[in-house]
Amino acid sequence: MDNLFLQNKKLLLVDDEPDLLKMVTAILRDNGFENITTASTVGEGVAAAQKEAPDLAVLDVMLPDGDGFSLMQQLRLFTNVPVIFLTAKDEAADKLAGLGLGADDYIAKPFLPQELLLRIYAVLRRCYKEDEQLIPLAGCTIDFSRAEIHKADEIIPLTAKEYTLLEVLARNDGKIVTVDSLCEALWGDNPFGYENSLNAHVRRIREKIEADPSKPVSLITIKGLGYKLNTRK
């Protein structure tokens, strides 16, 4: 569940290079991040942070109306959002200035896309714990930290098997998970003969998560293959 939990976080990217913003946004979206806001100036960055309340800010040091350091200081007036600095200058003075302000990481341009992605994951893991984990569905929210479904004003507990089944499906958000794989996750290395039991668990889960269990929109049957869970990131 680790990556799915982190990918639900809101990211703010502030850089005055349109091509770089486009590239980084595309890379992040390709890796599951959907909640991305971009800005190209200090002023736009402050306004975006006030409006969107991001969970992580990636700030360029050199901006048209100031620099990333002053932007971070303005952000600190209303948020403790973790910050990663980007700069075209791999200079010790810039690095020390950023880290001295309390930045969480620093990466010099040009950088490998995978390096930035790994640093973003690393900062998010340090700053956010999975006990906050909430997975939104069309008609409810799964709270994996408490093994509960929050549906309107109702709190519905999950059994151990239901929890495991939903955890496997959520980890593969939007992707088909085969019947054999789900049975193995629930009953171990000898999963054969459990398909009817799996179907029964799926029916009970749908009663808990779907607005209309007879017309499911979150937990979908893929005939002849298995099931998939559609989350609302």
Image: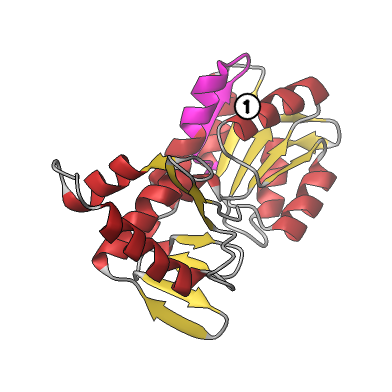
Q: Nearer the viewer, residue 159 or 98?
A: 159
- Residue 96, image x and y in percent? 52, 31
In the visual, does 40 lie left or right of 160? right
Res. 177 in view: yes
Q: Nearer the viewer, residue 196 or 88?
A: 196
Q: Secondary structure at mark 1?
A: helix
Q: Nearer the viewer, residue 85 or 92?
A: 85
Tell me the crowding category of disc 1: few under 14, some 14 to 19, or many 20 or more residues within 10 angstroms, Cα based: some
Question: Image quarter for residue 111?
Answer: top right
Residue 61 drawn above or below residue 209: above
Which stretch appears magenta?
Answer: 101-119
Seen at 39% across and 61% down, the residue is 202
Question: Image quarter for residue 116?
Answer: top right
Count of marks overlaid on the render: 1
Colour scheme in use = secondary structure
- Residue 35, image x and y in percent? 66, 47
In the visual, does 97 lie left or right of 205? right
- Residue 101, image x and y in percent? 56, 43
Whether 109 is among the magenta residues is yes
- Residue 193, image x and y in percent? 20, 49
To which residue does mark 1 refer?
27
Residue 186 drawn above or below residue 38: below
In the visual, does 80 lie left or right of 4? right
Could you tell me the amino acid type at mark 1?
Ile
Whether 58 is among the magenta residues is no
Res. 17 in view: no
Seen at 19% across and 45% down, the residue is 191
Residue 154 drawn above or below residue 119: below
Seen at 59% across and 69% down, the residue is 139
In the visual, does 147 lie left or right of 119? left
